[in-house]
Amino acid sequence: MQSEASIEIDRPIDEVFRLTHEDVAEWSIVVVEDEVIDEKPEGVGTTFRTVTEDHGKRMEFQGVITAYDPPHSIAIEMIGQMFDIQVAYAFEDLGGRTKATQFSNVTGKGFMKLFFLLFGWMMNKANCDAQDNELNNLKQYCEITAGHQQVAK
């Protein structure tokens, strides 16, 4: 199941990239824990553990950064028990504002593979809505956090 969504954020590209990458558990609706396991200086190959919670169901994923080009893009792969997720973010400088685009691909395993095949058309709408909600949260987090950082200086 693939999806793509974009949002414009009223913050510079460097800030949006950093907050998107470093503060996932703070801005994400579903990520409740995000822990770096082995950080690589070049970014690519950095491993992490993520715990999500959606409708009371917790899932753990083992992740790795597969592409890292600050402040323009980052891609990750997360391996879970029921499905795997590949997510990429592209950031475009809009002269002090940033366009953030999220690309995602969810691949089911076992029963979930069959479930996605049978009900993917129905789940796609819910997935797009969830993706829009995540990006709206990212926008709010970046704009509010950056504002607080400016006041604190």
Image: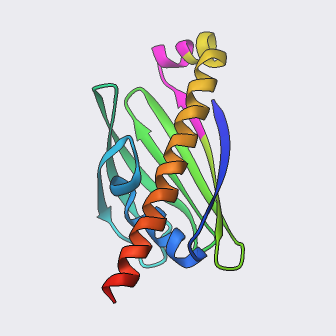
Going 43% across and 60% down the picture, which residue do you hit? 141
Nearer to the camera, 138 or 3: 138
Nearer to the camera, 40 or 55: 55
| Left or right: residue 151 compared with residue 76 | left
Residue 59, x across and y down, in percent: 32, 33
Can residue 10 be seen by looking at this rendering? yes
Going 71% across and 79% down the picture, which residue do you hit? 95
Specify the quadrant of the image occupied by residue 73. bottom right
Residue 150, x across and y down, in percent: 40, 83
Going 52% across and 35% down the picture, which residue do you hit? 130
Q: Is residue 110 above or below residue 145?
A: above
Residue 113 magenta-highlighted: yes
Can residue 45 be seen by looking at this rendering? no
Residue lying at the far bottom in this picture: please name it. Answer: 153
Going 66% across and 38% down the picture, which residue do you hit? 3
> Which quadrant would the C terminus be assigned to in this image?
bottom left
Residue 72, x across and y down, in percent: 64, 71
> Which quadrant would the N terminus be assigned to in this image?
top right
Nearer to the camera, 131 or 48: 131
Specify the quadrant of the image occupied by residue 27. bottom left
Residue 83 magenta-highlighted: no
| Left or right: residue 89 compared with residue 29 | right
Nearer to the camera, 3 or 47: 3
Q: Is residue 102 above or below residue 30?
A: below
Tally of numbered tags? 0
| Left or right: residue 58 compared with residue 27 | left
Residue 60, x across and y down, in percent: 31, 38
Specify the quadrant of the image occupied by residue 4. top right
Span of residues in magenta: 105-115
Residue lying at the far front in this picture: please name it. Answer: 151
